[in-house]
């Protein structure tokens, strides 16, 4: 029985192999190739269909692309308002002039202050002007309102109908427009900076540390940081100690980076993620906040000013004005001798009234 089953299995396998060889040897007939019937008329119809498809594809692509660009534009517009209709008001002894943002003069008017001057702060109503150790309050029309003598005068800020005046001997708050003393704090000061937020903060750099004062001049915080020059931004603050520039986290005072800067530092601030330091050897540009060196802008002057969007920086002094573009750091020279400039908006100073927080954010610090 076993032998019989083996022989039967062998026979089945042989039959399967024979069937397989037969099918492999046969030629499998394919369908007839598709032909375009109708000659030229059929080809024309095909080309017309392709053309219509291309037109529809281009139209749809254009619509999608346009919609995408419009969405991106709207998103950008909502994130950053368009640049204001800006112009500059320039000051020098005896003159007050109006000019374009690039420094082309428009008109000139008389100004009653005949001595070298510096505009410490301004708003939609007033200019706060320093000349020697005298502090002046002017209307934006150029009319003088009041004057006060401040020994060791350094800086001044306008906020909430008051003037916050910083001298080497301390901080004083005056009611405007007549400079009526409201409060003062006696402390040895090297530099100061006010952030005009909803709750303004005054950062005061002393030999013994960095004090943070509120609008009532009460101390709210103190950092173990000292130096000669100070700038405070939205997220970081920067201190120059006479040799080294150091960046810190604003909320904690923790050190981020430090670099050596040769030459005397006259002014420093951040603009669009770039920290600019005006020295005897030009403007040194660094990245915010790690202070990686970018380049030196070969300009000279006594002070720097910027527009509210921080896209144009003015370097003043030496009988000419340097206009520096940010972030490209390209610049050109205007034959315009000015002591100081104020950048105003055509919309009644809206950019100024928007507050120091927006300016600090624009400045990238």
Image (cartoon, rainbow, N blue to C red):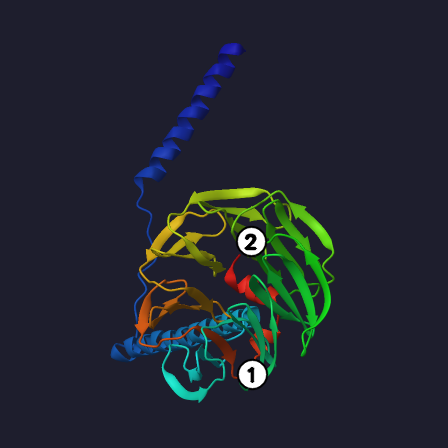
Report which quarter residue 154 is drawn in. bottom right
- Above or below, comparing residue 341 to residue 108 in the picture: above
- Callout 1: few (<14), some (14-19), or many (20+) C-alpha neighbours within 10 Å? some
Write the residue at 71% across / 61% down. 184
Res. 204 in view = yes
Q: Quadrant of the N terminus?
A: top right
**Between 261 and 153, which is closer to the camera in this rendering?**
153
Write the residue at 52% across / 47% down. 247
Write the residue at 33% across / 62% down. 299
Write the residue at 52% across / 80% down. 345
**Between 216 and 165, which is closer to the camera in this rendering?**
165
Which residue is identified by label 2?
A: 190
Report x, y in % for residue 105: 37, 84
Which residue is identified by label 1?
A: 140
Q: Earlier in the sequence, mark 1 or mark 2?
A: 1
* Residue at disc 1, secondary structure: loop
Res. 83 in view = no
256 left or right of 163 in image = left
**Between 284 and 310, which is closer to the camera in this rendering?**
284
């Amino acid at each position: 029985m076993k032998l019989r089953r083996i022989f039967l299995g062998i026979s089945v396998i042989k039959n399967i192999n024979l069937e397989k060889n037969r099918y492999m040897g046969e030629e499998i007939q394919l369908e007839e190739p598709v032909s375009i019937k109708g000659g030229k008329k059929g080809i024309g119809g095909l080309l017309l269909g392709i053309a219509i498809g291309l037109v529809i594809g281009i139209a749809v692509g254009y619509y999608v692309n346009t919609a995408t660009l419009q969405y991106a534009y709207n998103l950008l517009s909502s994130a950053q308002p368009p640049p204001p209709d800006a112009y500059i008001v320039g000051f020098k002894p005896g003159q007050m002039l109006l000019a374009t943002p690039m420094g082309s003069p428009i008109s000139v008017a008389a100004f009653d202050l005949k001595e070298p001057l510096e505009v410490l702060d301004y708003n939609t109503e007033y200019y706060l002007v320093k000349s020697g150790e005298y502090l002046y309050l002017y209307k934006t029309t150029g009319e003088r309102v009041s004057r006060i003598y401040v020994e060791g005068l350094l800086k001044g800020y306008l906020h909430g109908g008051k003037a916050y005046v910083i001298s080497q001997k301390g901080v004083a708050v005056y009611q405007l427009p007549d400079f009526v003393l409201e409060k003062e704090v006696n402390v040895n000061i090297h530099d100061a900076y006010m952030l005009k937020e909803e709750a303004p903060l005054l950062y005061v750099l002393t030999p013994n540390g960095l004090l943070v004062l509120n609008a009532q001049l009460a101390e709210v915080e103190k950092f173990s940081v000292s130096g000669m020059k100070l700038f405070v931004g939205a997220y970081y603050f920067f201190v120059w100690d006479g040799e080294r520039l150091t960046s810190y986290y604003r909320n904690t005072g923790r050190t981020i980076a430090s670099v050596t800067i040769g030459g005397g530092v006259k002014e420093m601030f951040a603009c669009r993620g770039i920290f600019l330091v005006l020295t005897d050897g030009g403007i040194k540009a660094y990245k915010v906040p790690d202070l990686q060196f970018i380049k030196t802008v070969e300009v000279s002057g006594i002070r720097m000013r910027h527009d509210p969007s921080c896209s144009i920086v003015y370097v003043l002094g030496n009988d000419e004005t340097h206009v520096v573009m940010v972030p490209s750091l390209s610049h050109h020279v205007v034959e315009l001798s000015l002591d100081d400039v104020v950048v105003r908006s055509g919309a009644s100073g809206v950019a100024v009234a928007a507050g120091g927080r927006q300016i600090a954010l624009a400045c990238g610090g």
